[in-house]
Image (cartoon, grey):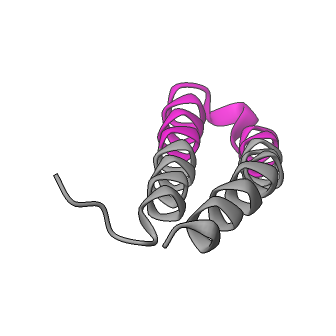
Amino acid sequence: MARTPESRTVIELLHLVAGLIAAAAMTWAAAWAYPLGYETIWWCGAGAMAATVLMSIGPLRRARAIDRRRP
C-alpha cells in the first residue's frame, strides 16, 4: 500500500482529534450527570483538552520531521 508523504503527520493529527473528541464527550457526560458541578467540570475538561494538545506537540514534530526526510 502506497503511503502519502504526509502520512505520519496525518496519523498524529487524527490521534489528536480523537483525543479531543473523547475528552469533550467525557466532559459533556460528566457535566450532564452532575449538573451542580457543570461549570467546574467544563473547566477541568478544558484543562484536559489543553493538556492533550500540549502533549501531542512532540509526536507531531517528530512525525513531521520523519515525513520531511522521506523521499
- Name the dominant secondary structure of the magenta segment: helix
Near-viewer residue (30 or 61): 61
Image quadrant where residue 63 sits? bottom right
**Residue in the image at 42% along x and 72% along y:** 5
Residue at the extreme left: 1
What's the residue at 80%, 40% (across, down)?
44
Q: Is residue 43 left or right of residue 11?
A: right
- Magenta highlight on residue 50: no
Q: How many marks?
A: 0
Return the residue found at the far front: 71
Give the x, y percent position of residue 69: 63, 68
Residue range corresponding to the magenta coloring: 22-46
User: In the image, is 49 to the left or to the right of 6?
Assistant: right
Compared to residue 16, the image places residue 36 above or below, namely above
Q: Tell me which residue sits at (59%, 38%) in the image.
A: 27
From the viewer's side, name the closer residue of 23 and 41.
23
Residue 45's image quarter?
top right
How far across and down, in percent of the image, does residue 18 sit?
46, 46
Q: Is residue 40 magenta?
A: yes
In percent of width and height, residue 64 lies at 65, 66
Q: Is residue 13 above or below residue 1?
A: below
Q: Is residue 34 left or right of residue 49?
A: left
| Residue 41 screen position, x and y as percent | 74, 38
Front residue of this view, candidates 59 and 19: 59
Does 36 sit above or below residue 1?
Answer: above
* Residue drawn where x is 75% and y is 62% of the image: 61
